Image (tube, rainbow, N blue to C red):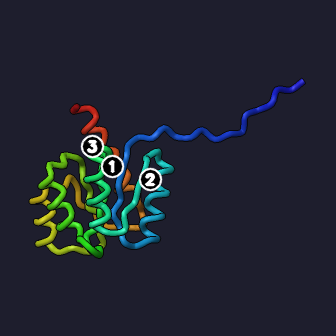
Amino acid sequence: MTEATNNTVPVPIPRGRILHAEDDRMVSILTARYLAEKGYQVETAMNGLEALTKVLNQPGYYDLIITDQIMPELNGVAWLTTLRKTGYPGKIIVFAAQFSAEVEAQFRAVGVDSILWKSADLTPLHDTIEELLNTSHTAG
């Protein structure tokens, strides 16, 4: 007799909780799906105000934030500035298609950990997440 084989695919263990603030629905869906396949637990927000509300309503929940710059309600600089004033110590990646040198300087002043140009290739984003989360887990 033959033994039955188990054809189930293993579900990855969540490797970190990420909030992704992005107003372009397709970019949001594709990025969240990609990161979920890499083992991350991803929540999305369609604008800066929604993202800020989610983080403030769940202090300490998110390991990392990814945000766009140009969004309705509050743009990336505005919502992150407010968030940092509340004492949020977490890792932040800006993942945006356009911003000026002045806006980049504002992001740096807010204390973002990385600024990446938005691209269809999400490998640099994944690599940056890995680096930031591994750094924070080994340092703690």
Neighbour tally class for label 2: few under 14, some 14-19, many 20 plus, Cα within 10 Å:
some
Q: Nearer the viewer, mark 2 or mark 3?
A: 3
Q: Report, in whole angstroms, how far the alpha carbon at label 1 lies from the one at label 2.
A: 10 Å
Mark 1 vs 2: CB contact within 8 A:
yes
Under mark 3, the amino acid is Gly
Earlier in the chain: of badge 1 and badge 3, it is: 3
Under mark 2, the amino acid is Leu
The secondary structure type at the circle numbered 1 is helix
Q: Where is residue 53 in the image (x, y as percent from the top left)?
A: 28, 59
Q: Name the residue under label 2.
A: 35
Earlier in the chain: of badge 1 and badge 2, it is: 2
Q: Name the residue under label 1.
A: 129
The secondary structure type at the circle numbered 2 is helix
Relative to 126, residue 13 above or below: above
Mark 2 vs 3: CB contact within 8 A:
no
Neighbour tally class for label 3: few under 14, some 14-19, many 20 plus, Cα within 10 Å:
few
Q: Report, in whole angstroms, how far the alpha carbon at label 1 lies from the one at label 3.
A: 17 Å
Q: Where is residue 41 in the image (x, y as percent from the top left)?
A: 43, 48
Neighbour tally class for label 1: few under 14, some 14-19, many 20 plus, Cα within 10 Å:
many
Relative to 70, residue 84 above or below: above
In the displayed structure image, the side of residue 100 where residue 39 appears, left or right: right
